[in-house]
Image (tube, grey):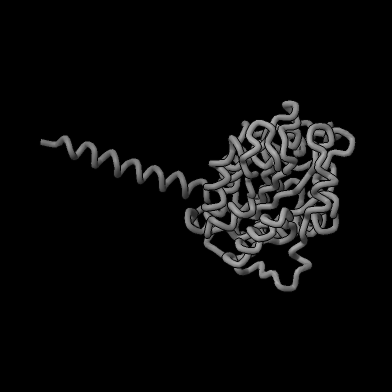
Amino acid sequence: MTKTYQTGHPIWCAGCGHFGVQSALQDALKRSGVELHDTLVLAGIGCSGTVQNNIGAYGYHAMHGRVLPTAIGASLANPELTVIATGGDGDGYAIGGGHLMHGLKRNPNLLYLVMNNGVYGLTKGQDSPTREVSVSAPEEDPLDAMLLGLSILSTTFLARAITTRSEQLNELLLMGLKHAQEKKGMAFVEVLSPCVTYNDSYPRWMNKVYDVDADPDYDKHDRGRAFLDLQRLGEQSRIPIGLIYHGEHATLHTSLLSDIAPAHSLEEQYAESTRTHMENVLASYAV
């Protein structure tokens, strides 16, 4: 017999932004109408890596930096599953940076939610790639994941939120979840989620954010203009939040899977490819 897993209680520090992220994710799942037994939440390593314990859906704890390829595999194996990959900025942008780049390029049908606090909280305060003023390398500029996403031409949904603006955060996560559920590709949502213990950025970020959703001149469908607008805002020490870009592009699923059941389709494709390759190798040795 199996025993139903009981959701846990968050273990984050009082005041951690991750509480708001978890609440918004639960709200989005409820409002989207998706059943928890049809949902898989995967998490990486770090403080954010415990969020899947508290949701009540199926959960998987991936290796450090490997949440995206694991999530993509799950989504390809069962395209009807609602797949949500979660992690922190250290997990996603440092050791997982290569997977992020290729995940954005391949555009799989899933939601990737990154909780950005600019620090490695679980391992006691080392700088992450998004730290504004790096202690170890103050001459380095922080990584801007939205600019990275805009530079990859197959991205379809890029958004950034902050936990102090819960209504916008809730709406962006709901939009991202629906984007993935409607099989339109990868919804990449970064949430500014301050760490009160090692990098209390609440006062800085609250005064630096710039809501592009409230800007009538901002065009979320124009990739080039969005890139220039984000670059300009960065030069003004502003942090753009809102729906950064929304477009259309072929997804990994449409380009890789056929009408055959996905798992069998992939198995047959690779088996045929391997068979053909081996026959060619053997033929090259024929006298």
Residue furthest toward the bottom?
A: 216
Question: Residue 123 at x, y = what percent?
Answer: 72, 26
Left or right: 239, with 101 as reference point: right
Residue furthest toward the left?
A: 287
Residue furthest toward the top?
A: 123
Left or right: 181, with 276 as reference point: right
Vertical comparison of 180 with 48: above or below: below
Out of 153 and 132, give the one closest to the viewer: 132
Left or right: 15, with 125 as reference point: right
Left or right: 8, with 78 as reference point: right
For the N terminus, the quadrant is top right
Vertical comparison of 67 with 252: above or below: above
Q: Quadrant of residue 100?
A: top right
Residue furthest toward the right?
A: 14
Question: Residue 118 at x, y = what percent?
Answer: 72, 39
Asked whether the viewer can see residue 88, the reply is: no
Out of 85 and 120, give the one closest to the viewer: 120
Out of 255 and 16, give the one closest to the viewer: 16
Residue at 61 percent across and 35 percent down: it is 65
Residue at 24 percent across and 42 percent down: it is 280
Question: Residue 98 at x, y = what percent?
Answer: 53, 41
For the C terminus, the quadrant is top left
Q: Quadrant of residue 115?
A: top right
Out of 102 and 90, give the one closest to the viewer: 90
| Figure label count | 0
Asked whether the viewer can see residue 260, the reply is: yes
Residue at 74 percent across and 60 percent down: it is 242
Residue at 85 percent across and 58 percent down: it is 167
